[in-house]
Image (cartoon, rainbow, N blue to C red):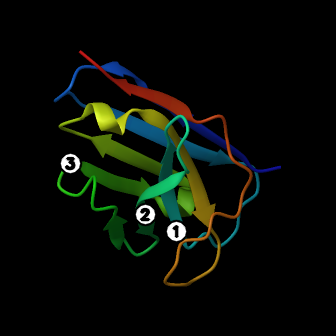
Amino acid sequence: QVQLVESGGGLVQPGGSLRLSCAASGTISSINAMGWYRQAPGKQRELVATITSRGTTKYADSVKGRFTISGDIPNNTVYLQMNSLKPEDTAVYYCNADPIRGGVFVPMFDWGQGTQVTVSS
């Protein structure tokens, strides 16, 4: 019923930028927060950024100062502006949503297909 669709990935040179988008379709009520994850080959999926319905944002240390999360939580849409990209940012990027209020982001929906980000010269 709930489908998460990520887009905006691609191949970019180091230092370049990309803007990722995520839209959640279907019936979703009272989403508290949305977030972006990434998973590189052979590595765990890691949380990189979250934003609450009130606009509070959090970032992984590895992306602070380079990535900016934004969105329209009531409409279940979230973006990730990625600047100063590094090769280590290469991964499949996924979004998800947390319907409950809490200090820890808990992804509660089935994962979408993700969008591939490749940073290479």
Residue mark closest to the camera, 2 vs 1: 2
Q: What element carries label 3?
A: loop
Q: Residues within 10 Å of mark 1 (few under 14, many from 20)?
A: many
> Is residue 35 placed above or below 102 in the rendered structure?
above
Q: Distance between the residues labelled 2 and 1?
A: 7 Å
Where in the figure is residue 93, as x and y percent of width and height? Answer: 50, 40
Query: The residue under label 3 is which amino acid type?
Result: Arg
Task: Where is residue 47? Give x, y as percent.
Answer: 47, 58
Q: Nearer the viewer, mark 3 or mark 1?
A: 3
Q: Which comes sooner in the sequence, label 2 or label 1?
A: 1
- Residue at 83% x, 49% y is 1
Q: In the drawing, does residue 111 fall left or right of residue 62?
A: right
Q: Tell me which residue sits at (40%, 75%) in the image.
A: 54
Instruction: Quarter of the image for the C terminus: give it.
Output: top left
**Total tally of numbered discs in the picture:** 3
Q: Depth check: 121 or 103 in front?
A: 121
Marker disc for residue 50: 2
Q: Name the residue under label 3.
A: 66
Q: How far apart are marks 2 and 3 (CA)?
A: 14 Å
Question: Which amino acid, by three-letter code, is at mark 1?
Answer: Ala
Circle 3: is it few (<14), some (14-19), or many (20+) Cα within 10 Å?
Answer: some
Where is residue 8 drawn, in percent x and y?
44, 29
Instruction: Work out whether mark 3 precedes mark 1 in sequence or the reverse, and give the earlier one.
Output: 1
Q: Which amino acid does label 2 sit on?
A: Thr
Q: Where is residue 92 in the image (x, y as percent from the top left)?
A: 51, 35
- Residue at 35 percent of width and 54 percent of height: 69
Check if mark 2's residue and mark 1's residue have beta carbons within 8 Å. yes
Which residue is under mark 1?
33
